[in-house]
Image: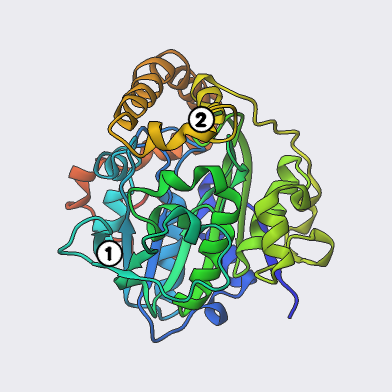
Amino acid sequence: MRSTVSVVRAAPQSALGDVGRAMELAGHRHALSPDATTILKDNISWHLPFLSANTTPWQLEGVIRALQDSGFAELTTVHNNTVVTDPFKGRVLNKLAPVYEAYGIPELYNFRPEDMGWVRYEDTEDLLALPRVFPDGIFVPDYFAGTNIVHLPTVKCHIYTTTTGAMKNAFGGLLNTRRHYAHTWIHDTLVDLLTIQQKLHAGVFAVMDGTVAGDGPGPRTMRPVEKNVLLASADQVAIDAVAARMMGFDPLSIRYLRVAHERGLGCADVREIEIVGDSEIAEERWGFRVGHNLASRVGHGAWFGPFASVQRLFFHTPLVYAFIFASFAYHDYVWWPTVGRVRQKRLRRTSGWARLFDAYAPAQDAGHAGRGSGRDEAPFAGFVKD
């Protein structure tokens, strides 16, 4: 069966309908099991509200509405923790919390024992990297078995994988807090995670937000660029490949996409992908470049460069906390106030998407907001402050 990716031109005033159209064109009703719980796996790459880095509130709201309208009534979300990103702060600052609250979506956390446990994954024969990374056993959340999962990534570059999207979004939810052990083998790890997902879940789908895309050393320190596009697909390889080509990269030159394609996990050859919707957008080439920042230069040296041979000393011992603190301090207290906030402020002057983001109410206002009654109202109708 040929892989299909929908590519849709989006606008702030029609964002929810645009998300729904992208999902319908990509066949979400057939890709997901109607009898299974559906996990909404948002992407909080940074707890700070930097457009292009994180799932947007209109992306999340549009997906929820499209799923509910299609009869998928049992929706949840699963947040994950990272050493440098606070999921509790991220869900609030990125205005995802009011959407979850207003639509009655339970929020679970894969690191809280009261929400879910971790079980050993035994079917390791086809895995490339994870048995080496975790020789004492690979563990996955028990809650994930038999569920649908809908990934909500953004279109952006990544310092370790060139691009990041649907396949990379499983890195947080499916692995525990020691997942940084896998960075040296990150490409093969992403292939392994897709292998596991295809066996673990009843259905896998992705809706990718490129309304504001991220150019530069992602997933955080990027240049946000307004591109007004949404993508959706049941093929996680294909959606990442189409997004990569639009950004200006050759998908088959990116190892995680090429290997996933070769192993039959999806299609990374865009010539073999059926692109539907506003297909002419898929012919755009944006000329994105990953580049480096201070943190990425250190990371490349540690994971792939001259210090990789002694990385266990740095990252498998308490010394790792020095790197965690340095990364946190650099991103939150150096780069954000001097560069990121300036770029976000500039975007507010020029982009309707930034103004739409501002129109969503903060989490504390969501309890007083009801779901909009009409199906054509603007995305922020239920959440804008009085």
Q: Quadrant of residue 336?
A: top left
Secondary structure under tag 1 reads loop
Residue 163 or residue 71, whichever sits in front: 163
Disc 2 to disc 1, C-alpha distance: 40 Å
Quarter occupied by residue 227:
top right
User: Which residue of the protein is positioned furthest toward the top in this rendering?
Assistant: 338
Residue at x 46%, y 34% (from the top left corner) = 311
Note whether 304 is above or below 338 in the view shown. below
The residue lying furthest to the right in this view is 271
User: Where residue 57 sits: x, y (%)?
Assistant: 40, 48
N-term mark: 2 or 1: 1
What residue sits right under mark 2 in the picture? 302
Q: Residue at x 56, y 51 (%)?
A: 165
Residue at (56%, 23%) from the top-left corner?
Answer: 297
Give the amino acid type for the residue marked by disc 2 in the picture.
Ala
Residue pointed to by mark 1 = 105
